[in-house]
Image (tube, rainbow, N blue to C red):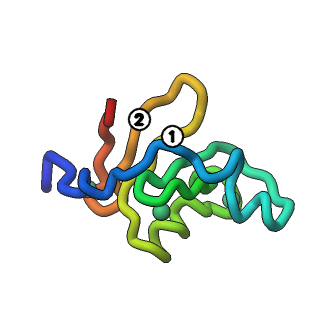
Amino acid sequence: MPSRCTHLKSVKTDTPNTRGCEECLASGDTWVHLRLCRECGHVGCCDNSKNKHATKHFKKTGHPIITSLEPGESWSWCYVDELDMELG
Ligand SMILES: [Zn+2]
Ligand SMILES: [Zn+2]
Ligand SMILES: [Zn+2]
């Protein structure tokens, strides 16, 4: 079990590309919570949302690290290491 994420070089942005889940906005769908891809700025919906676009984005692109976009939440998550972290 790794105790540290080794993918921090994939953190390239903290600016969301869109104001909501990119795919849900395109299809007119709704979401529960939003997650920001830190490699490309993609915004996807969380695993409590029916479409799970944040996880689908990782599976499609391999971009490992997301940060919660919910107000008051600052945690990040590495899909590869399955590790919680604070990126500060
Ligand atoms: Zn990692
Ligand atoms: Zn979505
Ligand atoms: Zn991405």
Check if mark 1's residue and mark 2's residue have beta carbons within 8 Å: yes
Mark 2 within 8 Å of ligand 1, using the beta carbon: no
Q: Along the horizontal axis of the image, is 86 left or right of 45?
A: left
Seen from the viewer's position, the closer of residues 82 and 26 is 26
Position above or below: 37 against 15: below
Seen from the viewer's position, the closer of residues 82 and 65 is 65
Viewport quadrant of the C terminus = top left
Q: Residue furthest right?
A: 28
x then y, percent, for residue 35: 55, 48
As helix, strand or loop, the secondary structure at mark 1 comes to: strand
Residue 68: mark in rendering: 1
Q: According to the image, label 2 marks what residue?
A: 75
Q: On the image, which quarter does residue 51 sit in?
A: bottom right
Query: What residue lies at 56% left-to-right and 58% top-to-bottom?
Result: 42
x then y, percent, for residue 46: 59, 51
x then y, percent, for residue 81: 26, 57
Q: Quadrant of ligand 1?
A: bottom left
Q: In whole angstroms, how far apart are the C-alphas of marks 1 and 2?
A: 6 Å
Mark 2 belongs to which amino acid?
Trp
Q: Along the horizontal axis of the image, is 76 left or right of 55?
A: left
Seen from the viewer's position, the closer of residues 10 and 47 is 10
Position above or below: 19 against 63: above
In primary-sequence order, the first of circles 1 and 2 is 1
Mark 1 belongs to which amino acid?
Ser
Query: What residue lies at 44% left-to-right and 30% top-to-bottom?
Result: 74
As helix, strand or loop, the secondary structure at mark 2 comes to: strand
Position above or below: 72 against 3: above
